[in-house]
Amino acid sequence: MNAKIDFSKISFLIVDGDKISAQVVYDTLAYLGASHIQRVKTPNDAFDVLRSEKIDIVVCEWRLRGMDGLEFLDVMRNSTNSPNRFIPVIMLTAHSEHRYVTTARDLGITEFLAKPFNAKALYSRLVSVIARPRRFINTGTYFGPDRRRRQVQFDGPDRRSLDE
């Protein structure tokens, strides 16, 4: 855990209908030093909080009642009624298969965290969000953080051949 981040200055919103799962996230954030942590059970409650308070990072479960985490993310990124299209969203799920990760990425997820997780894994995602934020892209069919992560050092005419 290299980066030194003062989590006490960052406000978090946990969106998770499962009391135990939400408590694990809450306890982990508190362990990391966070003191501004709110919990809600539904996306509608999350929208209410996001409209009325300053939240820096959302940690959201994929499976939610009424509207799942992906639908919540889609509204956050693409709706004209979104309280904050640019807010970092870390998606939690027990479904870490490639197709789920790809679906979440294509809807504008900031980070993806498979359950069960430990404090180091959540910390790593938080450092990525805070210390290495990605610029947002709007292509008409996608709005969200830049999905490209790999840094390529070579900038010549055959740069793409390095991807193979």
Image: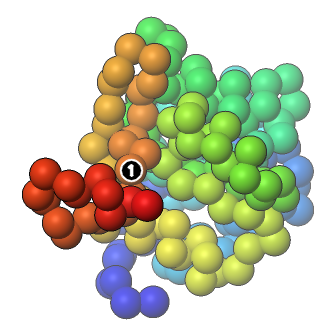
Residue 164 appears anywhere in the view: yes
Front in this rendered view, residue 91 or 147: 147
Q: Secondary structure at mark 1?
A: loop
Up-down relation of residue 147 to residue 12 (above or below): above
Q: Is residue 154 left or right of residue 35?
A: left
Q: Is residue 139 left or right of residue 125?
A: left
Q: Residue at x 57, y 32 (%)?
A: 107
Q: Residue at x 32, y 58 (%)?
A: 161
What residue would you read off at disc 1? 148
Residue 128 is situated, as x and y percent measured from the top left of the image, at 41, 66
Task: Give the quarter of the image for residue 2.
Answer: bottom left
Q: Residue at x 39, y 60 (%)?
A: 163
Mark 1, Cα crowd under 10 Å, few <14 / some 14-19 / many 20+, is few
Residue 15 is situated, as x and y percent measured from the top left of the image, at 70, 44
Q: Residue furthest top?
A: 80
Residue 139 is situated, as x and y percent measured from the top left of the image, at 35, 21
Q: Quadrant of the C terminus?
A: bottom left
Q: Residue at x 46, y 17 (%)?
A: 141
Q: Residue furthest left?
A: 156
Up-down relation of residue 151 to residue 157 (above or below): below
